[in-house]
Image (tube, rainbow, N blue to C red):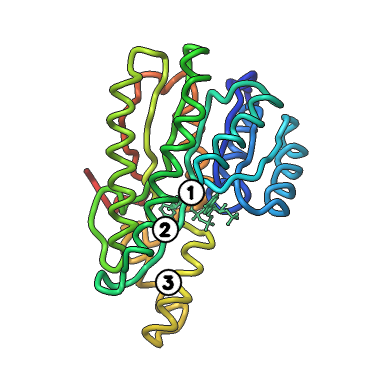
Amino acid sequence: MSRPLAGKHAAVTGGGRGLGVAIAAALAARGATVSLLGRTAKTLDAAAQRIASEHGTAVGSAFADIADEKSITDAIAACAAERGPVTVLVNNAGIAVSAPFLKSDARLWREVLDVDLMGAVYATRAALPGMLAAGWGRVVNVASTAGLTGMAYVTAYCAAKHALVGFTRALAMETARKGITVNAICPGYSDTDIVGEALKNIVAKTGMSRDEALANLVAHNPQGRLIAPDEVGEAVAWLCGAGAGSVTGQSIVLAGGELMP
Ligand code: NAP
């Protein structure tokens, strides 16, 4: 594969597992230097070593709780000091807490908004000055189909992801003449731990078998399947390449036709 992102430094939040590790690998495959940010050192280190040995690029990691502005700001500064300014930022880390609205108290709402919305805001505030100085940058926010349509039992998650899409659109306008693009990727149900946990929840609450619960989830997708993490990685990598330079403020749905906004 050619290495169009050689010389770029990409930071991926939640880069140790799930969609984040697939995104990091897709960027490394195109030659980017990559920093994996997250809370679990063991997972991050193992992913960094594997990606570096598979793709022959520099991959490092740093502890960051994205819900804590100082923690993510310090982590991005430490990564920039070690591997150069971050000019590609993938705001991927996220949590999905499900509960009926009347059981979703203020603590639940704050927890979800702090991670799924404010985490992206804090990380972008930390990385954007480096992009402005370089006159080039890519911000990719991993939202969700829940950022574009309503879904029952995840009001806080839906609200946070809708807000993330709004943030994407507004920042795209603000940076349009600065060589920076800002886009969102909106996957449908994907094959990661988040869906694994959702399935356990459905099984516990409804008494369905795991296969029945999975069949219910994939029924949302006209292709009748979960999205593979590598498909998300490829879409993010494309947005970071030169060919996508005119794409900004967009929310790209990866969901087998589930939504046609
Ligand atoms: P996952 O496998 O559960 O991984 C979540 C990642 O986020 C982990 O790396 C986790 O780090 C990190 N994270 C969570 N809270 C954090 C915090 N406070 N600070 C730093 N890192 C934190 O989930 P996933 O499916 O890969 O989801 C990735 C993104 O895709 C999320 O934004 C999610 O909303 C979105 N998404 C997922 C799906 C899906 O069906 N899977 C669909 C649409 C959108 P630790 O390892 O340290 O916990």
Quadrant in which the N terminus is drawn = top right
Label 2 sits on residue: 111
Could you tell which of marks 3 and 1 lies nearer the N-terminus?
1
The amino acid pointed to by label 2 is Glu
Label 3 sits on residue: 214
Rendered location of residue 61, percent (x, y) = 68, 40
Disc 1 to disc 2: CB gap under 8 Å: yes
Label 1 sits on residue: 67
Q: Residue at horizontal 33%, vertical 34%?
A: 168
Q: Nearer the viewer, mark 2 or mark 3?
A: 2
Quadrant in which the C terminus is drawn = top left
Q: Residue at horizontal 32%, vertical 38%?
A: 251
Residue 47, numbered label: none
State whether label 1 is within 8 Å of ligand 1: yes
- Which of 246/69 is in front? 69
Mark 2 to mark 3: distance in Å? 27 Å
